[in-house]
Amino acid sequence: MTVTATSVGEPARLRSRTARVPRVPRLARLIPAVAAALSGALLYVSFPPRTLWWLAVPAFAVFGWVLRGRGWKAGLGLGYLFGLGFLLPLLVWTGVEVGPGPWLALVAIEAVFVALVGAGVAAVLRLPAAPVWAAALWTAGEAARARVPFEGFPWGKIAFGQADGVFLPLAAVGGTPLLGFAVVLCGFGLYDVVRLALRARRTRAVRRGAVAVALLSVAVPVAGALAARPLVTDEAEDGTATVAVVQGNVPRAGLDFNAQRRAVLDHHARETERLAAAVEAGEVARPDFVLWPENSSDIDPFANADARAVIDAAVRAIGAPVSVGGVVERDGKLYNEQILWDPAKGPVDTYDKRQIQPFGEYLPLRSLIGAINSEWTSMVRQDFSRGDDPGVFTMDGTRVGLVTCYEAAFDWAVRSEVTDGAQMISVPSNNATFDRSEMTYQQLAMSRIRAVEHSRTVTVPVTSGVSAIILPDGRVTQKTGMFVPGSLVQEVPLRSSTTPATELGVLPEIALVLVAAGGLGRAIGAGVRGRRAGDV
């Protein structure tokens, strides 16, 4: 066989070209994964107790950079890393007293929702108007997290990190879904602005429409928030009321605070009597009504005469109606209850907590969990039962809506009190279990968002702090320290008008979920058409 020079030389030239193709170093391949996790951590840093709300925007810009050009499988993995970077530090308080197991399990499950969003965002970033579709998908993920599993866990909604931010007025327009959507849209839009600017600098071949959409994705959320500012006000519509918030403190932090039940009750009674003495001395204004925290009486006052006597004495001393947080057993069922206690008539009304906390107030899959770790079942020996009706107490002529602790994270639970006629809201809470963790400040920020969302004064009485008084514009005017007894007294505005967010309820969220579904459908359709064209 004759071998020509050409047949020998051609493979050599090909080998030469192959050798010149730069290979991506192994460490460089890790850059997207590291960037995804770090951008999630950056999102965490934007949340309270820090006031770095604006960091949420670059966090989503980096997330957009990480996901662009990826397939759905890569998007799934990178989304999971983003979720871990965000949720691991955000939810570390869930393991303060029970160890890392429940904390890590919760984060592992919740990050799955973020992973699914990442897969969807990777797909829609190929579409025109990509920031809109991507932000709507994030909102859809939050909507799912707020409902499943075990009736949902909305902690970590983007809106809850924006209490000090420029986007806050949007809460009054479309609630937490619109507020969160605006922040995420701005973040993905920022990435598109930078990406298109760099492309224009290199090639100058950039479509004007794409540039316009990117710029609008950043500008519209900010402009919308500025336009909504007139909805945010602290003006009184129905006069004012002088409210007192009592924080009695607990002898010890941690799970064993519940073993100190009588001591906790005595602390709150004592602090109320101290407040009554200060009122008599003219040191503080006389309150129209008083608000105690959740679990301020873990001893059932309907079944225990000594607990009833202690509460009765404190309420008569202050001479005003008091909302008492009690643990009550009725017909063999346990309830986390707020009790309206009149100084002359005693208990006259009750509200049973409706959104109870899984693994805290009831134990799902009790037999399965008991087989894994019997200590966990001993922590929740008896499940609490749920209430059925909204809780609005009439206290000295003021309609006060009760949203007990964990319920403040759920849109429907707060809105129902306002639509039932509440002129102000109280969020009685018990954070003693979580020691000095960031949980307290995260929850306080939720209450600030709710104040603006529904244009209502919000009070936050907490057993161990931080207790606070929040005006309808979201400003905290007074607050206590942690693990100290104290009381707050203030004249606050009462309001009865409703914001667009109150009127619209779940509709903005439904609309954004439909937008997300539309974007995902377009992306899937484009992918199918592309594969068919490749097969031809």
Image: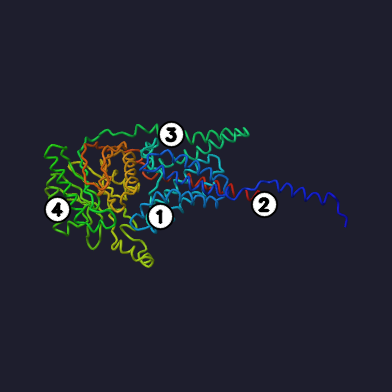
Write down the residue under mark 3. 222
Tell me the CA gap for discs 3 and 2.
45 Å
Tell me the CA gap for discs 3 and 4.
52 Å
Classify mark 1: helix, strand or loop: loop
Does 385 appear above or below 534?
below
Residue 470 horizontal/vertical position (percent):
28, 39
In primary-sequence order, the first of circles 3 and 4 is: 3
Write down the residue under mark 4. 310
Identified at 37% across, 41% down, the residue is 50
Q: Is residue 125 visible?
A: yes
Count neighbours of disc 1 (C-alpha within 10 A) and say few if under 14, some if 14 to 19, many if 20 or more. few
Write down the residue under mark 2. 535
Classify mark 4: helix, strand or loop: helix
Determine whether, in the image, residue 323 is placed left or right of residue 233: left
| In front: label 3 or label 1 | 3
| In front: label 2 or label 1 | 1
User: 462 and 118: which one is in front?
Assistant: 462
Which circle marks residue 130 in the picture? none
| In front: label 3 or label 2 | 3
As shown in the figure, which amino acid type bears the numbered disc 3? Val
| In front: label 3 or label 4 | 4
Tell me the CA gap for discs 4 and 1.
41 Å
As shown in the figure, which amino acid type bears the numbered disc 2? Asp
As shown in the figure, which amino acid type bears the numbered disc 4? Val
